[in-house]
Image (tube, helix red, strand yellow):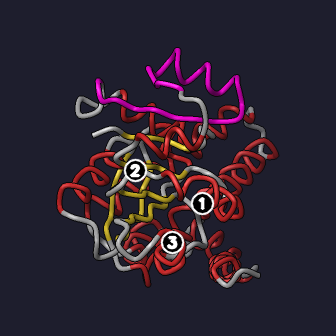
Amino acid sequence: MLIGFIGLGNMARAIIAGMRESEAFRHAPIIGSDHNEVKRREMEERWNLTIVADDIAVAQKADLLVLAVKPQALPVLFERINPSRKRGQCILSLAAGRPLSWLEETLGADTPIVRAMPNVAARVGGSVTALCKNGQIDDAQKDLATAMFRAVGQAVWMTEERMNAFSTITGAAPAFTFLYLDALASAGLKAGLPKPMALEAACHMVMGAAKLALETGELPASLIDQVTSPGGTTIEGMHTLKALGFENAVHEAVQAVMEKEKKLREGK
């Protein structure tokens, strides 16, 4: 099974790095193309990627073709590669806002297609990747896609209807979390801590809190009750966050991302 990547940007590099560090893909044949010579050289030298002439060459050779380009670049890309794509090829798209129906219309209804939405934590093997597929995908192709994204974290299959909400939480919300971490570090700095110390403490706190929620299976509301006590200090901070609209701000931010994704799907 020859795997080909069109586009070698940050996400493609993270996925390929994770694959090369996993036993399943350590020696797998992987080819790729990118207009950036520095990226091409890095991937060839560091991750044993075979660089081919251009996008068309990748499309001609790959059994699994990974589209790691921006959504707006897909129409022009398909015009270039469709006439020469390998027969029976499976397409794996990383593009937001381009649903299976659009991909099938462009590539052909008989094309096996997977959509995948990993997140930035793929760089450290911590991604949570949302996956959906059309009816042409067979078990072997599904297993291959699952293995690819397990090499960079968790892989979760779902219906496409759930992709928008799920990928908003897993894909966009890391940025919200980084904002939260930066705010905590800044607050620590204001309180007299060195910022690096405050940031490290905040990062470990978030990881620990998430681990506690996952491993105990307890609802966040129950865990909040365990941290707060009557007349205590933490409840003062909780009331301040609620008064300032913390929860509403999170809800509105998630909704804004989902609305933008909807506009992308509609071509707006």
Q: Residue at x 44, y 61 (%)?
A: 116
Give x and y (percent) for residue 93: 49, 59
Give x and y (percent) for residue 136: 28, 71
Q: Residue at x 69, y 52 (%)?
A: 184
Q: Is residue 233 above or below residue 85?
A: below
Q: Is residue 162 visible?
A: yes
Q: CA distance from mark 2 to mark 3?
A: 16 Å
Of tags 2 and 3, the one toward the viewer is 2
Q: Mark 2 sits on what residue?
A: 86
Q: Mark 3 sits on what residue?
A: 103
Q: Residue furthest top?
A: 45
Q: Secondary structure at mark 1?
A: helix
Q: Residue at x 72, y 83 (%)?
A: 243
Residue type indicated by callout 3: Leu
Which mark, residue 146?
none
Q: Secondary structure at mark 3?
A: helix
Q: Earlier in the sequence, mark 1 or mark 2?
A: 1
| Quadrant of the snapshot with the C terminus | bottom right
Q: Earlier in the sequence, mark 2 or mark 3?
A: 2
- Disc 3 to disc 1: CB gap under 8 Å: no
Residue type indicated by callout 1: Phe
| Quadrant of the snapshot with the N terminus | top left
Give the magenta-colored segment's residue range. 27-51
Q: Secondary structure at mark 2?
A: loop
In-image side of 196 versus 116 (left or right): right
Is 133 contained in the magenta span?
A: no
Say few, some or many: other residues with alpha carbon within 10 Å of mark 1 (under 14 / 14 to 19 / 20 or more): some
